[in-house]
Image: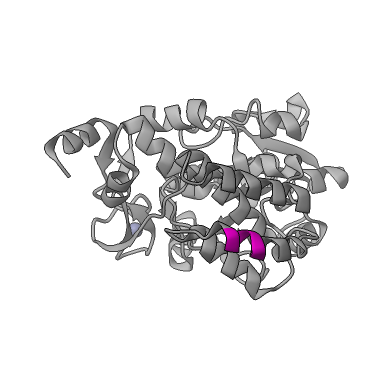
Amino acid sequence: MNFNTIKLFKNKIYKINICPLCKTSKAKYHSECNKNLYSEFLSKIIGISEEDLIKKINNYQCSNCNLIYKNFWFRDNILKNLFSKKIKIHPKGMDIYNKNFNKNFFLNELKNLKKYYNKNLPLFNKSKRTIGSIINAIKKQSPLKNRLLREIDSDNPNIKKIFKISTKVSKLIDQPKKFSRYVGYNDISFWNFIKKNTTKINNYAEVGCPSWGLLNKAKEEKKKIFFYKRNENNFWNEEKGCLKKSKLAKKEIVTNLKIINKISLFGIIEYLDHLNDPLKFLKEINYKSQNFFIILEKDNKAIQHFTSWENKSLKFVAKKLKKKVKFFNNYTKTKNIIIAIYY
Ligand SMILES: [Zn+2]
């Protein structure tokens, strides 16, 4: 990395010297981040190559609480720019409404892939990601899915071969997998599971993407619901996207928990790994609610996630909050998630 690149970084990112959870400093190198939509945009905002960004920002693991966190993190204005200008609308959340999980959309996206190949790299990559999302959400098992993913991801993709496998893969497209980006967590058996493992629910609150969680299921059972809309630099504002689509009533959206007395159950869904100070946030949630649960994607160490969690880190939280925690790490085979219920 040359001197100018290093200088550029200085104003845009800062070094993380202590664990964001337990505040100790001993940590080991863990892994590199993969390129994705966020590394593409972040490198543009900073004005460096995506390669340099990936080289600079790595995952480290705390030797005390096992939390995995980034060794450098983006300054507030960079994250604000990313989520308020570059990626205003939550792409995964919007997939709930877009109805893009179907054969025609898939085959059409393959045409785009061919069109942009060797002509427009950002659009080619976008097509690649969209096709990858659909393949990953296909419920039916088949070795063809991995073959296609590998071919699309290779440095020298063979377009002819891709089309040949795709025609076969397109025939597997039926219902999306449980908890995939096309359906989210709004699932009756999951709601029943959560109820079985928590307290009696009078009211239910949630934070994360408003289109993803269990708010609708709680509402269908006439529970009072709240969506907690926090001011968070490293998360979508959702105003024009999922929040609008979710059709929540005004009184169901709260920006300050002080107006609520007590919450029976609080759901924190694919959100915790975005935060700079996760413990401070969890203390606030714990203070307000009888029980709460955390859902996180397992092993997601993508660049836009400041942290990645294991059982040991989640147990550390329980100890700090003087709560008990139970884990359900194999709730579903179709998506790699951690469910931690605090009670
Ligand atoms: Zn730690």
In the picture, the quarter occupied by the N terminus is top left
Residue at the image point whose x is 44% and y is 52% from the top: 302
The furthest residue to the right: 221
- How far across and down, in percent of the image, does residue 212 sit? 69, 46
Start and end of the magenta stretch? Answer: 160-165
Q: Is residue 296 magenta?
A: no
In the picture, the quarter occupied by the C terminus is bottom right
| Left or right, residue 31 beside residue 81 | left
Q: Which sits in the foreground, 285 or 211?
A: 211
> Measured along the vertical axis of the image, is residue 103 above or below residue 299?
above
Residue at the image point whose x is 78% and y is 28% from the top: 249
Instruction: Determine if residue 339 is in view.
Output: no
- How far across and down, in percent of the image, does residue 217 sit? 81, 48
Instruction: Determine if residue 116 is in view.
Output: yes
Q: Is residue 163 magenta?
A: yes
Residue at the image point whose x is 52% and y is 39% from the top: 123
Residue at the image point whose x is 80% and y is 60% from the top: 174
Q: Which sits in the foreground, 24 or 214?
A: 214
Quadrant observed for ligand 1 in the rendered image: bottom left
